[in-house]
Image: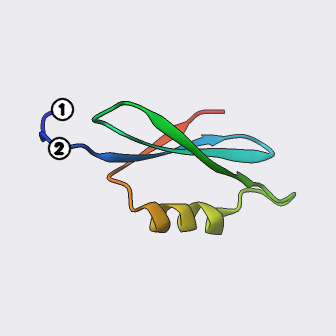
Amino acid sequence: MASGRARLVLAFDFGLRRIGVATGDTLTGGATPRRAIFNPPGGIDWAAVQKEIATIGPDLLLVGAP
C-alpha cells in the first residue's frame, strides 16, 4: 500500500434481483457483509446505492460484474 494508511472499501456485487454489499479495508483485507439492496421490477434502486455510499463514506468503491 503506497499511502501507508488503511483505506475503507465499499463493495457492490450487482445481480438482477439484489445487489450484495460489503465493507472491508486495505489493512486486513477482510470484508464484512451488509444488508443486500433489493432491486424493484423497474431496475436498480440507485437511491439505496447512493445512501450506502453516503452512510459509509468509503475511500474506494469496488463493483463486481454480474
Task: Please count the marks in the image.
Answer: 2
Question: What residue does disc 1 label?
Answer: 1
Q: What element carries label 1?
A: loop
Quadrant (top left, top right, bottom left, bottom right) of the N terminus: top left
Residue 32 locus on image (x, y percent):
52, 41
Residue drawn at (72%, 40%), measured in percent from left and top? 15
Residue 20 locus on image (x, y percent):
65, 43
Q: Check disc 1: other Cα within 10 Å, few if <14, some if 14-19, many if 20+.
A: few
Q: In which quarter of the image is residue 47?
A: bottom right
Residue drawn at (78%, 43%), measured in percent from left and top? 16
Q: Specify the color scheme.
A: rainbow
Taking 49 as reference, is 41 left or right? right
> In the rendered structure, are the residues bearing label 2 and label 1 in contact, judged by CB atoms less than 8 Å apart?
yes
Residue drawn at (68%, 46%), measured in percent from left and top? 19
Question: What residue does disc 2 label?
Answer: 5
* Residue 13 image label: none
